Amino acid sequence: MPTQQTSRQISDPQISAPQISAPPAAVDPASGIDSAAVVVAAVDVAKIAAEHARAAERDRRLSPEVVRSMLDAGFARHFVPRRHGGDAGTFEEIVRAVAVVGEGCTSAAWAASLTASLGRMAAYLPEAGRRRIWAGGPDTLIVGALMPFGRARREEGGWRIGGTWPYVSVVDHADWALVCAMTTEERPVVRFFAVPRGSWRSEDTWSSVGMRGTGSNTLHVEDVFVSDELTFTRDAVATGVAEDAEAPCHRVPLKAVNGLCFAAPVLGAARAALTAWREGTAPRHTSASGGLESAAAVVLGRAAGEVDTAALLLESAVRRADSGRVTDLEVARNSRDCALAAELATAVVDRLFTSVGTRAHQESVPLQCHWWHAHSVAGHVVLGFPAAAETYARELQREK
């Protein structure tokens, strides 16, 4: 898209500090680790991200201050195995935390969510590879290129890889990248390869109209050797079969949780839009008695109800994911619920945006920012409802 879009000014989302109740029994008595702390820490990340939101839109990447706050809050370490200093946390905690960050900046929420998810994926590496990745601690920032746009040739002790991967979010801040490539063997296999910073280069190609702050640039790897301890098959993460997995988060199929990664930022955007509408629009439709006019009350009531419905769908999905054991039908149900939650949340932003009229299109009105972001995230292929519905229907029929 044209780089002239950088001239489009986006007003900072004006958020109120999210009200978060301390989760019960947050500390694991066996390890002493409080992985639920990420939910509380997310409030500060949301505030910092909101303060830097305009700069993120202008620069088409997150500021170092936002990335540092995200790492300090525990997003990168959330799914890292405990033996490597991580929290091996739950999907419930990360979805709640990401949605909170989304109330401040959807791009930051997206980055936080992917950072946590890539830490989970790196746990599928062999033990020696995990020790290398997290040698400096569990807050290593890992990014991912998940489509097999590379080629890998077998050599003694490892693989020779190369390729070009577009849309790699937060790549300019990353320590490591997990890139996906097809092997050139007689029977090709799709594998992930962990590549350290310095072994790739990034190209500034991200010029989207929404989610500009994600810095989803193109990653290039040219003729790099990757040793065997830094690779695993895509089937391993797809099926949830990790080597010596120690926590439920490492034993769940990818399709059961992939939608959570993308739906949570949309939920945060919808909540932010609702807050912006109440602060900027509701006062214009308040009667002398102090109540909202009928039409405005209907908009508010429906939007708030649909936001709550989207949140309940995600809560249901994380409960299944956190069990560590899901059936094929439950995997399909999770995909369905994540897609539906994102659809509902985006509809909320649409309804609020439309209700304001022409004024909503002004650069000074926060709603237009949330509108761009919600649609950008909801358009991700993982959140496509038709495909999710077909898979769910097929699995439901098999249960008969």
Image: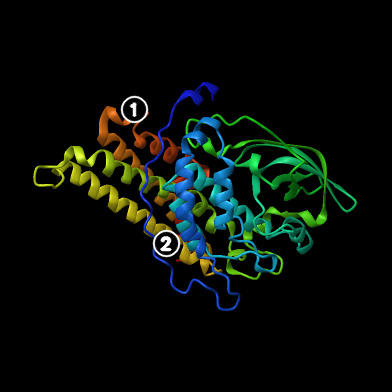
Figure quadrant of the N terminus: top right
Residue ranking furthest to the bottom: 29
The residue type indicated by label 2 comes to: Glu
Residue 315's image quarter? bottom left
Residue ranking furthest to the left: 289
Measure the C-alpha gap from mark 1 to mark 2.
35 Å
**Dot 1: few (<14), some (14–19), or many (≥20) neighbours within 10 Å?**
some
Q: Is residue 143 left or right of residue 133?
A: left
**Which residue occupies the foreground of this view, 295 or 102?**
102
The residue type indicated by label 1 comes to: Gln
Give the residue at x 27% y 44%.
Answer: 278
**Which residue occupies the foreground of this view, 9 or 385?**
9
Residue 370's image quarter? top left
- Front label number (1 vs 2): 1
What residue did someone put label 1 on? 362
Image x and y of residue 153, in percent: 83, 44
Give the residue at x 50% y 65%.
Answer: 36
**Dot 2: few (<14), some (14–19), or many (≥20) neighbours within 10 Å?**
some
Give the residue at x 82% y 55%.
Answer: 228
Image x and y of residue 387, in percent: 48, 47
Q: Earlier in the sequence, mark 1 or mark 2?
A: 2
- Label drawn at residue 400: none
Dot 2: what SS?
Answer: helix
What residue did someone put label 2 on? 315
Q: Is residue 53 left or right of residue 270?
A: right
Whether label 1 touches label 2, CB < 8 Å: no
**Which residue occupies the foreground of this view, 371 or 160?**
371
Image x and y of residue 294, in percent: 14, 44
Image x and y of residue 241, in percent: 66, 64
Give the residue at x 88% y 53%.
Answer: 157
Q: Is residue 335 visible in the rendered structure shown here?
A: no
Figure quadrant of the C terminus: bottom left
